[in-house]
Amino acid sequence: MQRGLTMIFLLAAALLSGCASTIRSEVTTFHEWPAQMANKSYVFERSKEQDASLEYRSYENLVRAELKRLGFTEAGVQTVPMLTVRIDYQTAERDVRVTEPVVINPGWGAPYPYYGRGWPGRHFPFYDPFWYNPPVVAYRDASFRVYGRQLHVLIARMRDAKKLYDVTVKNDSRNPTTANVMPYLVRSAFADFPGPSGVARTVTLERQE
């Protein structure tokens, strides 16, 4: 019985906290990636605003690291690259109202009083340490803010601007800081590169503290 009560309490706690140890994103990829591409040199294509943004440069470094992992090389000043890479991202806020479970009695340390047999002709209350109230789960309405983020990465051929890899990553989070979430969005964008084309899939990554 004690094991059953523990499992109920842990399940309710998990519902309250959500999947805080993972980050799930919806990834949609369209590509015509060549089966063989020996030259994967590239250059980032930036707008004037992006070129002046330190935040953008930080996220560009994340993409640069993923491209290096996949065998791409960033072209030097004197080198004509084979590819161009463009990054765009945005964040939108919205308020969400949900009904969530709340444990109002976890069952620990709240024993039932028991009136047992004492001395002849007398009864007195005592507490049984092995008998606990079962946890009670109630429901309440809660409101919170959700941050919807979208990352778009486009890899195109330099000579004719033909699109070769076009990926969009969407994620909803209660974390207000984009910089904390962006590393996972970038990793999701290149998960199983180039991956299936024209298919929306969910990528789940373990959160790293």
Image (cartoon, rainbow, N blue to C red):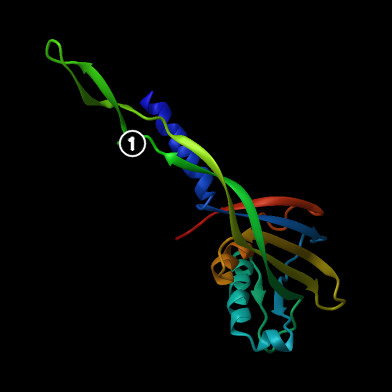
Residue drawn at the location 44% of the way across and 38% of the way down = 10
Q: Nearer the viewer, residue 153 or 125?
A: 125
Query: Is label 1 in a helix, a strand or a loop?
Result: loop
Q: Nearer the viewer, residue 125 or 176?
A: 125
Tell me the quarter of the image containing the N terminus: top left
Q: Which residue is the site of mark 1?
A: 108
Is residue 62 placed above or below 36 in the rendered structure? below
Whether residue 102 is visible, yes or no, is: yes
Residue drawn at the location 72% of the way across and 69% of the way down = 153
Residue drawn at the location 84% of the way across and 78% of the way down = 159
Task: Point out the residue furthest to the left here.
Answer: 119
Residue 75 rendering spot, x and y as whole percentages: 67, 81
In screen coordinates, is 99 left or right of 10?
A: right
Q: Nearer the viewer, residue 70 or 205?
A: 205
Whether residue 190 is visible, yes or no, is: no
Q: Amino acid at mark 1?
A: Trp
Q: Nearer the viewer, residue 132 or 113?
A: 113
